[in-house]
Amino acid sequence: MASGTSANPHIIPEDKPQCVLEKACENPDSEFAPEICGYCKNLSYGMLSGKIETYKENKGLGSPTKDDDPIVMLMNELVRKLLKERKDLEKKLSEKNNPTTQRTEYLCASIGPEKDYAESPWRYELNPKRATACQSVHRKGQLCDSCLEAMKSQHSALFDEYFDPEGIVGFTCVFQDERYNDLQWKKDYTPADYRPLTCERAVRNLTMCKKCQVRLGGEMGTSFDKHGMLLPHARGGVR
Ligand SMILES: [Zn+2]
Ligand SMILES: [Zn+2]
Ligand SMILES: [Zn+2]
């Protein structure tokens, strides 16, 4: 490409993003076309479905839902195709991993299988707003580098609420987290036979995992709230 000083108005940029989701698409330069743009390709299933609903609302296609609208039909078809591609990729990744060793490659959490974290609000709201294609990751529930960078640059509150700084969904259980080892609640509530490896990821930061909640059977003392989150006075300065 010529590195001229003035823009030639006759040259149409080849990489103009094209998107079927029209105004529901958040790609600032996208133009309508029977395709899904890179931004929208990085959205979770829940978020994509929401965008189709937004499109219908904007077009006054509300209820009863007019699924025979040609654009809605096209969107549904493209989303089906995209999900099929993701499923095939997920299958390929799982086959690639040697069954005798631990699995080491997964889809980025943003585009991960529909059933994964289906009930978590972030699956419906997290939006990398980025066209770079997602890469595979080494842990289930991890965001790829491209999505992680995007979420950090957006200073997304949703990201801070549900992902640790490495971009892995959830947080280390406070019983597993060694930073609290010297605190009294940990000494009082950790049974002698407790093994940190049995912990799951905690859904929120500063919280115990589901298994530990069950283990304590509601005996949270004065250090935790009813959801198993450490109260500020019991955090020992950890944030
Ligand atoms: Zn789009
Ligand atoms: Zn990603
Ligand atoms: Zn735990």
Image (cartoon, rainbow, N blue to C red):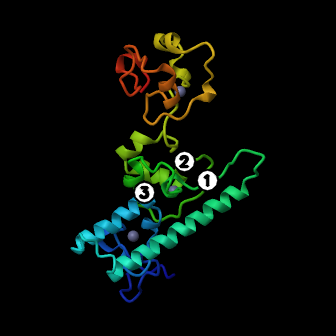
Mark 1–mark 2 Cα distance, whole angstroms, equals 8 Å
**Image quadrant assignment for residue 37:** bottom left
* Pointer 2 residue: 142
Mark closest to the chain's N terminus, 2 or 3: 3
Hey, what amino acid is under mark 2? Gln
Report if the beta carbon of the residue with label 3 is closer than 8 angstroms to ligand 2.
yes
Of residues 174 and 159, the one nearer the viewer is 174
Q: Compared with residue 25, is residue 97 higher up or lower down, i.e. above or below?
A: above
Q: Compared with residue 32, is residue 161 higher up or lower down, i.e. above or below?
A: above
Hey, what amino acid is under mark 3? Pro
Image coordinates of residue 163 in percent, x first then y, are: 46, 42
Query: Tag 3's secondary structure?
Result: loop
Report if the beta carbon of the residue with label 1 is closer than 8 angstroms to ligand 2.
no
Q: Is residue 90 left or right of residue 161?
A: right
Q: Residue at x 68, y 49 (%)?
A: 104
Image coordinates of residue 170 in percent, x first then y, are: 48, 39
Image coordinates of residue 41 in percent, x first then y, are: 47, 66
* Pointer 1 residue: 106
**Image quadrant assignment for residue 51:** bottom left
Query: Tag 1's secondary structure?
Result: loop
Q: Is residue 122 left or right of residue 182?
A: left
Please name which of the two marks, 3 or 1, marks the residue nearer to the observer: 1
Q: Compared with residue 225, is residue 117 higher up or lower down, i.e. above or below?
A: below
Image coordinates of residue 28 in percent, x first then y, are: 34, 68
Q: Compared with residue 191, is residue 24 higher up or lower down, i.e. above or below?
A: below
Mark 2–mark 3 Cα distance, whole angstroms, equals 13 Å
Marks 1,2: beta carbons within 8 A: yes
Disc number placed over residue 128 in the picture, else none? 3
Hey, what amino acid is under mark 1? Tyr
Any part of residue 69 in sight: yes
